[in-house]
Image (cartoon, coloured by chain):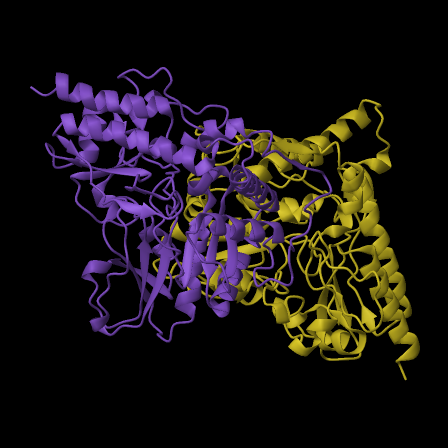
Chain colours: A yellow, B purple
Amino acid sequence: MESLIVADKTSLYHNTTPSSLVPNLPLNNKDGSSSTSSTTFNSYINLDQGDPVVFKEYWRKKSEECMVVIKGCELLSYLSDLRSVCWFMMPELRDAIKRLHALVGNADTNDMYIVVGNGSTQLFQAALYALSSSSSSDDPINVVAAAPYYSEYQEQTDILRSGIHKWGGDAMKYDKNEAYIEVVTSPNNPDGSIRGPVVNSKCGGEGKLVHDLAYYWPQYTPITHMASHDLMLFTFSKCTGHAGSRIGWAIVKDKEIAKKMTKFIQMSSIGVSKESQTRVAKIIEVLCDSYKNFKLGGLSKESELFFEHSRRLMMERWEKLREVTKQNSDFSVPKFPQAYCNFTNETSETYPAFAWLKCNKDEDCESYLEKKLKILVRGGNRFGSDPRYARLSLLGKDDDFGEFLKRISIDMNEFRH
Amino acid sequence: MESLIVADKTSLYHNTTPSSLVPNLPLNNKDGSSSTSSTTFNSYINLDQGDPVVFKEYWRKKSEECMVVIKGCELLSYLSDLRSVCWFMMPELRDAIKRLHALVGNADTNDMYIVVGNGSTQLFQAALYALSSSSSSDDPINVVAAAPYYSEYQEQTDILRSGIHKWGGDAMKYDKNEAYIEVVTSPNNPDGSIRGPVVNSKCGGEGKLVHDLAYYWPQYTPITHMASHDLMLFTFSKCTGHAGSRIGWAIVKDKEIAKKMTKFIQMSSIGVSKESQTRVAKIIEVLCDSYKNFKLGGLSKESELFFEHSRRLMMERWEKLREVTKQNSDFSVPKFPQAYCNFTNETSETYPAFAWLKCNKDEDCESYLEKKLKILVRGGNRFGSDPRYARLSLLGKDDDFGEFLKRISIDMNEFRH
């Protein structure tokens, strides 16, 4: 699942930032992204949201190749493909999504239904609707996830105080004999762990699973198996970094569930932008073509392939972060096991999109980073976890990431005593 | 509010179509729109949904002028404008929307907040959320609209069995001393009437209004005043016919309500496609520029201006329809009063996007049209009204509209006795 952008101006970067601090916050560039190119210790660095601008440089080189041209009379109709359960999905997007998963080997799309949504956020709610409304229970179904869980699941579940589903908290602690939906996020947001379902089936409640695989792409983690769960969510935002397009998709085994998800999206937004669908299909085609050309001995260098390039970026950031936290025992980050990646044919570890930082010298990591180092992050309590932890985005601009490392180092050297 | 597209394949065109009839249904063209170019009496004509393809020919002539080009590295970030309450709205779209309303004179945007959404459907739900959650009542707030009301309001309100709002039915019959939201749709979908609020304030319940002005554009109705209500909804789908873009907007007086609507959209879809926002901004600019050039004595002919052109299309369809219903007393359509339009500087009547057809020889208009004439429409009961009525889209293709008129005429001449 994608990370939250907080709406209110006084809290856009951060939930607890006092409004008096707002003038210090970096304002957005023309493209909407934030900038701290002239960062000093007087400016805040925002590592709260997972805005995936780290991949922008890559796409700059592919700008012309990925270009889409849309004329005035195109894409007028609501309808896309009346033969498909998801009638608003364009066939070229469906084909591109299948091709991408076949290339990466991360999810099985054979004999599965694909439902496109306005980001995986909308699909998460569509999944809850579809699974809840097909539950035999009259009571709201419990939605649970193992802590630390994505900070937005709870509010996305409860925003309308639904009578069909309600947030049930930490899946590890779930012991009710009632129907439930367990959200399995793997690699996990915020902590990057590889996960499976955890609810104890001995409780006897009827359980359904939603697999949120937003980060199951080769730049973040080894592709160890072809996932083939009942209901899987993916988002283009975290796959290539094109978050502004708001395209996500679900891969669904059961036709009736796919129909209900489609109905939810119909009732919420009568479909999904065709401009975005067209563009995402094009970008996926370019991405897949570059692998095809490379394998045919064509012009592409291996380092110029998207997942290889982006995996190197993530690996470099993690290496730098580990170097700093190794020298500064005030902070620590999780270690990840090595695994063989069927996509890269190499053994490597997970390089998550977020660092789940533990602050060893303060009980409140978020507050410490904000007050002492002017780094805005999302505290552990937001994820149903310990406030000694905080989540930091590693998908931001180079400048911001570099400045973050500098501040953590300065903190160690100058502010310690 | 926009009209429903029914998702299920067996009912995509129509709620009651038996699945055995599906093979006869027209399949979609490459652009997703349906076609009956080879219509015979063996094929169904679908006038159920309001897919606005009638305007396509106009945009074909403007295709190059309205062309947008989007490169691979553009529009990556979630964020658009951190200075705006609606942080995911692109400034160029906001400016274009304000320019369009200033040109048409249909809504006041001065000192108002604009919130963009995935169609006005999402904004309707965002409005319900914002108004309900700022209500002083602990019980679900009643959402009402005067019958006949848009067929989807009820399900959009109740889909998650929300604890903060619930459908309350016909506003004319509302007599509870409880908080309510009245949806005022003007011109009304389905019947084209010009409306104001109707709930009797003597009941004492705290009332809030949502004005759904999807059809308050010069091609459908005279622009009699500059609307300046607390919360107004518009959709690009019905303004220019670009329904595939899924762009709607709300114009909101109260900053806190605009913030809550923004939050709802954030929780539902983390914003709105930037590709669509870019394209809609471009099309609005081209539309407004053509008026500017015309007024400056430039190249455009008056008949080539969008609202003049589309108004003539709607007028011609209504004239043909009135001609047929005049000759065939089995069917009747509403009459509309004349009014002076501040935009065209002429007196004219309303030419609604839908015909609210009354069947005088059968108690069930929908069933009659389907069984006797193979015309798929939406029956009056779906709008909280009498089944002797049915709603027919007048926004479809010329072929379909022509075939519809033919069948109504044939019905009179050949099937009567």
Q: Residue furthest front?
A: B297
Residue A178 appears in the picture as rendered: no
Q: Quadrant of residue B20?
A: top left
Q: Quadrant of residue A413?
A: bottom right
* Figure check: A4 above or below A98: below
Q: Quadrant of residue A240?
A: top right
Query: At 86% across and 67% down in the image, what residue appears?
Result: A325
* Figure check: B108 above or below A112: below
Residue A295 appears in the picture as rendered: yes
Residue B190 coordinates in the image, percent (x, y): 28, 44
Residue A37 coordinates in the image, percent (x, y): 83, 60
* Figure check: A105 above or below B202: above
Horizontal side of residue A105 vs B169, given as left or right: right
Residue A270 coordinates in the image, percent (x, y): 44, 43
Query: At 35% across and 36% down in the image, what residue appears?
Result: B49
Residue A26 coordinates in the image, percent (x, y): 74, 65
